[in-house]
Image (tube, rainbow, N blue to C red):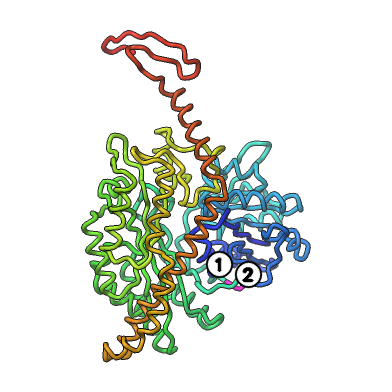
């Protein structure tokens, strides 16, 4: 069995980090298949394909060569990101033609997207968590049993889609094998993803992760980390839990266990965690996190505009966010801020602010919050989210025929924004905000910081404290210069893909659809949206 993580459709702000990490879900599924016995399993991450990986004339992963060298009977595909789905279908079509059985899973595959997948080279779609489902499905296929007995899958039978009984979410994670990153071929992994909690109870309108948080034991997460430290000399980890700090008692236990472990082995690890701003009020938790080596926190600020936060169900005020961000900063954390620019308001509650005014609000907030690095994306109406349902009901989403799944990565406008914003202004504003933070001048600051190193040590009078302060300043300059390279490459990629033409076509089609759905009213007359012929109506109470 081969599990494929499809490549991003073009260079974007994720491309740089993707070259040194991988997706955790596919590795977990592949590990479970390996543990079944009788299966030779590998994972191909097209975004981290650097160690002697064969490529074709177009520079893409050469699956034909790989299949000739090691023919796969079954090929699984990761569909956790909507933007990679077109590439997923492309590769699935090749393996289907090569005689392999194809299976896909991930957050993208819900509702009509399941039928789309089954007509695009996919034999089976896994509709929930895959660890147990994949084992049962493969066993059924090998033994010749009916796949309809397997819960949590969809497939075609007689030309119609069959959805089997839904599978309950996993709760006993400790009985699953630890992820085996040795299965990822051709990759150079420096940042290892690990997890303890699945699910999130925050219920944000734009997010696909819902449901009651389910946690593994603190000991299991420590074992994931310790095994990677001792087998592949890992030092950097990303805890992929949507909200670090859920199940507080177990989180505190994990932090204390990890702090003791590092002290015993005499090695300092560096961890990044996603966390809510309001955890800044828990000073005991912050202290435990620092002792455990959690140096970077990724925080979803989303917006400095209060009414937008209300629509998102964030339950925070901008002034509170400023205060809490500074608390993280004072406690020594590197703060990575994540923002959404131009979030659509509810009908009748539009936030009528120009693009330039919004940019000023964002810049002022970012400066006052002392955010070290930032990521500014556009709202994405992902399949299955409440945001998509709302925008679809309002007739604001651009049709997939004009703006395909490959644009669903947060860097492209995908719906008609609130006035006076335009789609083009939204996209330029996001680039402008990051461009102001990540500048070429940081290359010169790197050299300046190096020259200032002795002065820092002498001035502080404390080598350890002086080193920490100097390193943070120097590291920030390095990261910001790297960010400038990323934003520059991203901007060049945007100019080449011809999205502006697609956007214009999408806007025109949206106007046509709106005209058909809502006839225009002028001076007591109605004109038909399709024919343009005028229709008369009586203006009487209770009558149309």
Q: Quadrant of residue 11?
A: bottom right
Q: Marks 2 and 1: CB-CB under 8 Å?
A: yes
Foreground residue among 125 and 405: 405
Foreground residue among 384 and 301: 301
Classify 448 as above or below 415. below
Label 2: state its secondary structure: loop
Rendered location of residue 391, percent (x, y)? 41, 38
The local crowd at label 1, few if under 14, some if 14 to 19, many if 20 or more residues have their Cα within 10 Å, is some
Foreground residue among 58 and 182: 58
For label 2, the residue is 50
For marks 2 and 1 on the same chain, the one whose residue lies earlier in the sequence: 1
The local crowd at label 2, few if under 14, some if 14 to 19, many if 20 or more residues have their Cα within 10 Å, is some
Which quarter shows the N terminus?
A: bottom right
For label 1, the residue is 19
- The span picked out in magenta is 181-187
Rendered location of residue 63, percent (x, y)? 71, 59
Classify 388 as above or below 539. below
Please give left or right for residue 430 compared with residue 93 in the image. left
Please give left or right for residue 400 compared with residue 363 in the image. right
Please give left or right for residue 323 compared with residue 42 in the image. left
What residue is at 50 percent from the left and 48 percent from the top? 408
Res 532 seen here? yes
Classify 520 as above or below 501. above
Please give left or right for residue 415 compared with residue 281 in the image. right
Classify 429 as above or below 473. above
Res 151 seen here? no
Label 1: state its secondary structure: loop
Rendered location of residue 68, percent (x, y)? 78, 62
What residue is at 43 percent from the left and 50 percent from the top? 208
């Amino acid at each position: 069995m081969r599990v494929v993580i499809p490549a991003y459709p073009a260079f974007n702000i994720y491309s740089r980090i993707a070259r040194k990490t991988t997706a955790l879900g596919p590795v977990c599924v592949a590990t479970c298949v390996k543990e079944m016995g009788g299966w030779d399993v590998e994972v191909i991450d097209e975004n981290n394909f650097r160690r002697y990986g064969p490529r074709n004339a177009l520079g893409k992963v050469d699956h034909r060569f790989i299949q000739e060298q090691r023919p796969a009977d079954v090929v699984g595909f990761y569909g956790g990101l909507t933007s990679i789905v077109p590439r997923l279908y492309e590769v699935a079509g090749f393996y289907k033609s090569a005689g392999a059985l194809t299976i896909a899973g991930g957050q993208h595959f819900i509702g009509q997207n399941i039928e789309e997948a089954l007509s695009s080279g996919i034999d089976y779609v896994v509709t929930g968590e895959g660890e147990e489902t994949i084992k049962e499905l493969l066993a059924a296929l090998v033994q010749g049993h009916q796949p309809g007995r397997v819960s949590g899958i969809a497939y075609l039978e007689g030309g119609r889609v069959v959805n089997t009984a839904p599978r309950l979410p996993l709760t006993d994670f400790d009985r699953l094998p630890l992820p085996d990153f040795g299965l990822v071929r051709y990759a150079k992994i420096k940042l290892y993803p690990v997890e303890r909690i699945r699910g999130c109870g925050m219920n944000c309108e734009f997010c696909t992760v819902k449901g009651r948080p389910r946690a593994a034991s603190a000991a299991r997460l420590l074992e994931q980390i310790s095994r990677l430290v001792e087998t592949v000399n890992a030092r950097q980890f990303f805890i992929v839990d949507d909200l670090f700090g859920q199940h507080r008692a177990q989180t505190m236990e994990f932090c204390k266990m990890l702090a003791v472990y590092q002290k015993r082995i005499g090695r300092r690890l560096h961890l990044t965690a996603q966390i809510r701003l309001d955890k800044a009020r828990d000073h005991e938790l912050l202290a435990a996190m620092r002792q455990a080596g959690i140096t970077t926190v990724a925080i979803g600020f989303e917006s400095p505009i209060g009414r937008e936060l209300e629509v998102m169900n964030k339950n925070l005020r901008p002034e509170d966010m400023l205060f809490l961000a500074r608390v993280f900063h004072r406690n020594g954390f590197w703060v990575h801020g994540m923002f959404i620019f131009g979030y659509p308001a509810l009908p009748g509650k539009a936030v009528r602010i120009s693009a330039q005014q919004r940019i000023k609000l964002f810049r002022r907030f970012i400066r006052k919050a002392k955010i070290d690095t930032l990521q500014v994306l556009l709202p994405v109406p992902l399949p299955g989210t409440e945001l998509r349902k709302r925008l679809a009901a309002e007739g604001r989403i651009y049709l997939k025929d004009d703006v395909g799944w490959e644009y669903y990565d947060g860097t492209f406008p995908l719906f008609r924004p609130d006035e006076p914003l335009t789609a083009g202004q939204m996209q330029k504003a996001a680039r402008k905000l990051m461009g102001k933070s990540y500048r070429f001048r940081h290359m010169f600051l790197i050299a300046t910081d190096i020259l200032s190193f002795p002065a820092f040590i002498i001035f502080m009078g404390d080598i350890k404290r002086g080193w920490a302060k100097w390193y943070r300043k120097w590291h920030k300059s390095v990261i910001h210069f790297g960010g400038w390279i990323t934003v520059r490459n991203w901007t060049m990629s945007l100019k080449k893909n011809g999205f502006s033409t697609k956007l214009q076509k999408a806007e025109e089609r949206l106007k046509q659809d709106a005209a058909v759905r809502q006839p225009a009213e002028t001076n007591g007359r109605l004109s038909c949206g399709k024919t343009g012929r005028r229709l008369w109506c009586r203006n009487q109470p209770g009558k149309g």
